[in-house]
Structure formats: C-alpha cells, structure tokens
Image (spheres, helix red, strand yellow):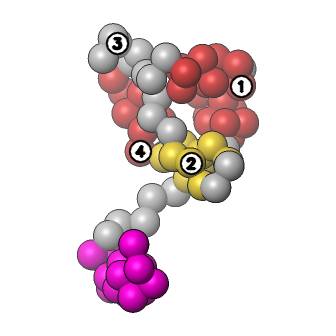
Amino acid sequence: MHLSDRVQVFASASKGEFPVQRLLTVKEAAELLACSEAAVRKWIYQRRLPKVKVGRLTRLRLSDVEALVSGGLGRR
C-alpha cells in the first residue's frame, strides 16, 4: 500500500466512512469478562476470539468481546 493510499484511507475514516472501534488489551478484556488473562489468551489461540495485531501488540475489539458475552463460546 502506497503512502497516498494510506492517506486516503485515513481521510475516509475521519469522515466517518469507517467506524473506529475501541480496542482492548488482553488484561482489559479479562477484567470485562471476569476471567483470567490466560483464559482470554486461550480463546484467542483457539480462534474463538478474534485478535487485532497493532505492531507486535495484541488487541481485541470491544464488539468482539461483547459478541462473545452475548453469543457464548460455541464452536466456530
């Protein structure tokens, strides 16, 4: 992706075309779910909870964590 393409993506996002979602750390997600960080990492490893990589950091979308609460941990 060229720099000009990135600028267009960020310009589009600032206009509201791409909704910005809150990203949580594994620790924040564990606190929200009232479970251990190890459990959250296990669900990420099992691909039951999708992750977002920001550089080398792992983050979770708040909407994915909320979907986990409402839908449970059923097999995908």
* Above or below 3: residue 37: above
The Cα–Cα distance between marks 4 and 2, rounded to whole angstroms, is: 16 Å
The Cα–Cα distance between marks 3 and 4, rounded to whole angstroms, is: 17 Å
Quadrant in the rendering for residue 7: bottom left
Q: Locate residue 62, reporting x and y percent.
A: 49, 46
Range of residues picked out in magenta:
1-17
Q: Locate residue 44, reporting x and y percent.
A: 54, 26
Q: Residue at x 33, y 23 (%)?
A: 71
Residue closest to the far left: 17
Q: Can residue 10 be seen in this snapshot?
A: no
Q: Which residue has dot 3 on it?
A: 74
Q: From the viewer's side, name the closer residue of 56 and 35.
A: 56
N-term mark: 3 or 1: 1
Quadrant housing the C terminus? top left
Residue closest to the far front: 2
The number of numbered badges drawn on the structure is 4
Q: Which mark is residue 37?
A: 1
Quadrant housing the N terminus? bottom left
Residue 69 belongs to magenta span: no
Element carrying mark 1: helix
Residue 9 belongs to magenta span: yes
Q: Which mark is residue 63?
A: 4
Dot 3 alpha-carbon crowd within 10 angstroms: few under 14, some 14 to 19, many 20 or more? few
N-term mark: 3 or 2: 2
Residue 38 horizontal side relative to residue 48, left or right: right
